[in-house]
Image (tube, grey):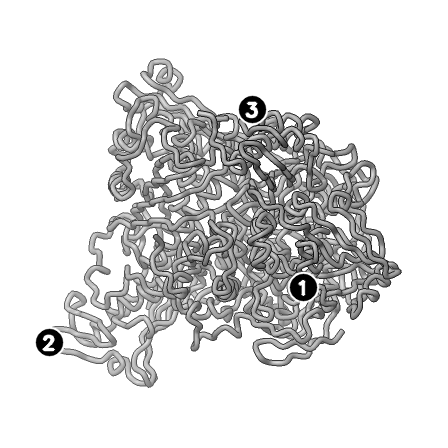
Amino acid sequence: MQTQLSINGESHELEADSRTTLLDALRNHLGLTGSKKGCDHGQCGACTVLINGRRINSCLTLACMHDGDDITTIEGIGSPGALSPLQDAFVRHDGYQCGYCTPGQICSATAMLQEVQAGWPSHVSTSLEDDVSLSNEEIGERMAGNLCRCAAYPNIVAAIREVAGAGEDA
Amino acid sequence: MTRTMTMDRPDERRRLDDMSQGLVGRPLDRPDGPLKVSGTATYAHEWNVPNAAYGVLVRAPFSNGRLRRIDSAATEALDGVVGVFTGEKFLRNPAQGGADEAPVQGTETVQYLGQPVALVVADTFEQARHGAQNLAMEWTAENGVFDPEAQAADAEEQEDETVDQGDLDGAMRAAAFTVDEVYRTPCHNSAAMEPHCSIAEWDGEDLLLRGSYQMLNYNVNELADSLGIDAARVRMLSPYVGGGFGSKLGIAPEAVAAALAAKQLQRPVVVALSRQQVFDMTMRRSETRQHIRLACDADGILTGLGHEGLVSNLPEEEFAEPITQSTHFLYGGANRKLGIDLVRLNRTCAGSVRAPGEAVGMPALENAMDELAEKLGMDPVELRKRNLPDKHPEEDIPFSSRKYTEAMDEGARRFGWSERNMKPGQLREGDWLIGHGMAGASRVNILSKAEARVTMGSDDDGVFATVETDMTDIGTGTYAILSQIAGEMLGLPMERVRTQLGDSEFPKGPGSGGSWGASSSGSAVYLACEEMRAEICQRLSCEEADLTLKDGDAIAGNRKTSLAELIGGGGQISAVGRIEPGKTMKESAQSSYGAYFCEVAVDRVTGETRVRRMTGVFGAGRILNEKTATSQCYGGMSWGIGMALTEELVHDLRDGHIVNRDLAEYHIPVNLDVPQLDVVLLDERDDWACPLQSKGIGELGLCGAAASVINAIYNATGVRVRDYPATLDKLLDGLPD
Amino acid sequence: MRPFEYTRATTTRDATRAGTDGATIIAGGTNLLDLMKLEVMAPERLIDINRLGLNAIEESGDGGLRIGALVPNSDLAADRRVRKDWPVLSRALLAGASGQLRNKATTGGNLCQRTRCYYFYDTDMPCNKREPGSGCQARGGFNRIHAILGTSEQCIATHPSDMAVALRALDAMVEIENAEGERRSIPIAEFYRLPHGTPHLDNELHPGDLITAVTLPAPAGGAQIYRKVRDRASYAFALVSVAAIVTMEGDRIASASLAFGGLAHMPWRDDEMEAVLVGATPSDDLFDRAADVLLKDAQGYGHNDFKIPLTRRTLKAVLRDACNVGEPA
């Protein structure tokens, strides 16, 4: 079936089986291989992309469900010559090792910071009603949907802290 | 030009210390970073190969027996399916690391539930997956063997591992204090984030395989042997590997299946494992049962040490988790009994998972040492220090550099170890019981044969160098450190050195495994550069000792010459360096060392444990890049946290199949499970190790880490967990009501 | 994944009629596609309801809240009114899944999650829930995550939702529309089924039924707690969870609404146990008696035996917090 997808500001015509997930559409049909397949079941976060600004697992949604949506992948966040502040911070803080979960981490963190701006609480927030203070624990919880087997977690937290302007954790 | 060095004697020149560029050791960013953070690094599945078909493997749905028939007619009739493949060349399981030949092959004999028995290929991934899910088979099942401890009587003794020195039983009877306990660790899975994947493409009789592999040098031979073709016909590419941790050491079923299908279909075929298949048909770390006996006198001096284990594997596999590897030399004790028994099971193949041996062997030993310290009423740091042997306790050889004491002292100081409560269950904050624990780290150091080519040329921006080797970077930092070594030796800034990896046509490296990659391939680069420096000296008519290379210039005496000029437009200087392990490996006991200090909080209601802080101090010879080395240690320590608290690959004892075969139920640590770790790398040079004076660090962070968590849980709660992992159910009985 | 015909509903009627004709409704898809990839579920037709609206959170006349079936879990958790007046619901949602999944998972879809039983997920294993009559491998197999209450010979699976546990404590209603366009509202207590001899049926939805909303009664006030116990710090299903809403009058418990996750085929609630608490003065002894009632028929299957003491301990700790009493010295 045919689906019109808007990805990173560009329109793409996808002709694919209805079974095609958004992740497989990106990787196998559109040459956008920055989004990774780590588990294909929403259990690792490597496939994280933004749909209308929100982070989702692209492996658990069908491409044909997303015509008209504004899709942002890691390729739309920044490129090697023009890295986003988060991408740049990941490089400097060594917030990755093998690099496979990294695009998902960065897409996820990009949206996560918006969620914090919007005042969304998390599981570890002491209060549901107060403003969020981005502690290491808050970052750890909010990034829990992005597994990193190399376990660059301490550096991922440091990179996100820096970009969020959160300073040192108390 | 080739320069070869066999490591027959310590290299005390420490030439890297004489260089001027100032790159080696510095915490430089990885040159591959911008590609990785932007999603533009090319992993195995991501090559643009036109007209590729997709293959999906099919597993055997039974544990042991004979696959009589695959009825492919219905599957072949499905939309898009272009072929169903099976047969005697399929791999039963991946090759073991460094096998250099095909593993057991064939689909007729099935020996574990999950064994790959067929490949369904179709025009699209969706079509192939559906075909694979509905492939009909007929089989005759036989009884299998699934429970390791029930089979212990039939175990095969691993004679190379056996040590029986003195009289351990007697030492136990005569000792002032003893520990005599059994520790168990479950199976683990590497769970690298990138599932195994291969794209096979033939050009006539020549095979190009783009895969996710750690050791191309061996993988080419394993693949060729599996297919029955000449290795010269095989080229492999693995420039980026999305994590390995041992799971991608040997050629795996998807590569061979892809190659067979691509050949017959005359079309490239891509085969990626699903996450469930990674669990089913790659490698597991064997479960272990470890019997540890410690005997000491009233002062805590060990008089006896026993470490005897039971591990498992499939029939015909030689690999037996070498749990006693560091126990042989870490502590003294004249009366010693070490050994490993191997049972044959119908379970997924057992092989190398990050730090095979020490990953699970060290925690058991370090738990036992903690138990002994408690009986003695002694600081566990002090107990360890008292038992460091002067030389290898089983062989008459010296230690090379050993920073174990320094690691413990520095860790204790940073952590505030002296302020802990020695008595368990004393410290409480709300519902949290707080405890502290420590453990030692040890990982044997290995040098492996390696070659690399370095070429210096010039372009409009001046002189540059290229490093080429088939070595891989699986997240370890190879791209960074090889560029740093070449830049240091040749006097070039980082951005003027380009390292190219993961092409089997490059000079053969050792591959990424056993923590030998950096030292081995780094030494090869170093030697190539030494040869190039000799050539520069010749052109400048100067002595090597008088030559300084820095920022693209050669300085000899009071003469400064631009290297670009020296090489000349269009010219180049190139050399191959080759390192070979030699007598120093046998004439000294080489290991990296370290120490962990951990604070846990255990919920007194639920038994949930959180690691609140953890310090790791490590001595691994010269550190080549402080940033990437620290990251390796973060990773290792996090694996230790996972091993201590959450990771357990569960086999159903009725049929051996893996029950929790996905990332929702096989619990690797998430971000919130890992605190901001504190890692210190000690300044060290190990002249016996290699001409860089560096040792392995990729696995060290894991080798004992879990014990520090478990020891801290004991300190928090008074509950000794000897059956890993310390999930909450194992603590509940011992917690206050 | 089996090939399927994909259509998009533009009216609720499209969806319910397609459902009558055998189509499976897809909303967030986070569990359905997960299961379809493994062919645990293999619908031939999918009807996509994502563009039906149904995504508003509105105040109802009685002081309650009407939550559209397509409201994402993250929006519901972050809704200011929910955070203030139904905090147990926010807490339960935030304890579930990951930020990415909560953005996609919907209110209606969350209620319809299938079990996480390992044997249900593995199509090479017999499973009465997936394939009625084939057998239950979890009994006698590895059953760490399985039920201890309300099980049957045929099935010992648990319901995995956190949200539904909070909704059970809140006495939420599920609003359903059928193919005839009729709407009915059923208490969440009657929405789920125990496995009995029909474990393939998770709930009381019939072909053609579409969940259109979940409604919450007026705020209950009191102390609201959601305590989830799991195997890692985050991103894991509950071993045991407790949703508690407790109000006090002086030093006595005026009302207690307690629902449990991880224990049964449905969010579990025990009126008899609540009756023990209501009107009584909080004490550890009282909490123990409540736990005795809750767990009197509890049965472990080996690996999940620990859930019995864990439930008792967690319940007692939650009640201590909810009643604001310290532990006995």
Instruction: Same chain for labels 3 and 2? Say yes or no.
Output: no
Amino acid of disc 1? Ala
Residue C166: percent from left, percent from top: 64, 46
In this view, the residue in front, B266 or C319, is C319
Read off the residue under disc 1: C56
In this view, the residue in front, B432 or C152, is B432
Residue B723: percent from left, percent from top: 50, 31
Q: Is residue B613 above or below residue A93?
A: above
Host chain of mark 1: C
In this view, the residue in front, B275 or C312, is C312
Judged by depth in the image, the label closer to the viewer, 3 or 2, is: 3
Read off the residue under disc 2: B558
Q: Secondary structure at mark 1?
A: loop
Q: Name, please, the residue furthest toward the front.
A: C250
Q: Secondary structure at mark 2?
A: loop
Q: Is residue A25 above or below residue C112?
A: below
Read off the residue under disc 3: C285
Quadrant where the N terminus of chain A is found in the figure? bottom right
Instruction: Same chain for labels 3 and 1? Say yes or no.
Output: yes
> Residue at point 51% right, 63% down?
A115
